[in-house]
Amino acid sequence: MTDNAANLDLSDPQTDPYAVAEAAAAVIRERTGVETHDVALVLGSGWGQTGDLIGETMTTIENTDVPGFGKAAVEGHSGTMRSVAIGDTGRRALVYGTRTHFYEGKGVRAVVHGVRTAAAAGCRTIVLTNGCGGLREEWAPGTPVLIRDHINLTAHSPIEGANFVDLTDVYTPRLRDLAREVDGDLDEGVYVQFRGPHYETPAEVQMAKVIGGDLVGMSTSLEAIAARQSGLDVLGISLVTNAAAGISKTPLSHEEVIEAGKAAADRCGRLLAAVVAKI
């Protein structure tokens, strides 16, 4: 571990976030006995079963044992990461059972630490999943939707300094095409990230719709930006867990999100497992 990584407070401007990511990747290599992972997955609400369907879990690591990571802060998420064999291909997936959300107040560096650690661990592709609110009435709860693009309303970026990263194709078109080979019924849309943790107001949802949004949530876009900066190909998939505020006829609740995720777990898990097998 470098001197800069010895300080694991990612909010400290004197800390090198990439050194912390390298230190985290070193622990993952040591614990798993695998020099390189190939694909990383961030499992959002409703996607927890996916890791079981990709293949055999070879190693499970508590987040708190890895530099820069912490406990899960959201009900329905797992505070572990797993090294999973991708079928009999000889490849490995690094599966995160939770993410750090921007609304937790730990700073953008902590939000994207998992992405940077994945890159340091050798991954060339990352799959970002989430549970979200849908703006289209035809997307019933339980519908998976490919993310074509995003609108970042957090007013923050994980990129520091004069580093001008092209986000034209932040969500890799080739991977979206591959996902549609698995499920030809997959629709796609634009994901709008709000800061949270409160749900959006009906007026905010209408604003998101006017500016081109189809999905609203509290994650993913900052991670996708960091992934592109790190040279990773990105596949984003949202699970519509509820109709967004003003579109939904009932009050929003996290319990609704969890229940919709459970109901769609098998379909979403099998979809993503089949996609990962093709990456």
Image (cartoon, helix red, strand yellow):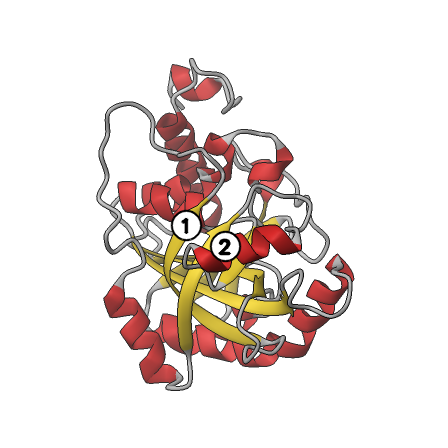
Is residue 272 rendered to the left or right of residue 267?
left
Residue 219 percent coordinates (x, y):
52, 49
Is residue 96 something one can see in this rendering?
Answer: no
Is residue 264 rendered to the left or right of residue 235?
right
> Three-letter amino acid code at disc 2?
Ala
Q: Residue at x 35, y 44 (%)?
A: 225
Q: Which dot, 1 or 2, sits closer to the camera? A: 2
Can you tell which quarter of the image residue 149 is in? bottom left
Residue 241 percent coordinates (x, y):
63, 68
- Give the Cα separation between the discs numbered 1 and 2: 9 Å
Is 37 drawn above or below residue 121 in the view shown?
Answer: below
Image quadrant occupied by the N terminus: top left
Residue 271 percent coordinates (x, y):
46, 78
- Between 252 and 182, the one nearer to me in the picture: 252
Circle 1 residues within 10 Å: few <14, some 14–19, many ≥20: some
- Between 88 and 237, the one nearer to me in the picture: 237
* Residue beneath disc 2: 208
Q: Residue at x 41, y 77 (%)?
A: 187
Q: Residue at x 40, y 15 (%)?
A: 3
Residue 160 percent coordinates (x, y):
33, 26
Image quadrant occupied by the C terminus: bottom left
| Pointers 1 and 2 in contact (C-beta within 8 Å) | yes
* Residue beneath disc 1: 151
Is 78 drawn above or below residue 53 in the view shown?
Answer: above
Q: Earlier in the sequence, mark 1 or mark 2?
A: 1
Can you tell which quarter of the image residue 261 is in? bottom right
Secondary structure beneath dot 1 equals: strand
Is 1 drawn above or below residue 122 in the view shown?
Answer: above
Q: Residue at x 28, y 51 (%)?
A: 232
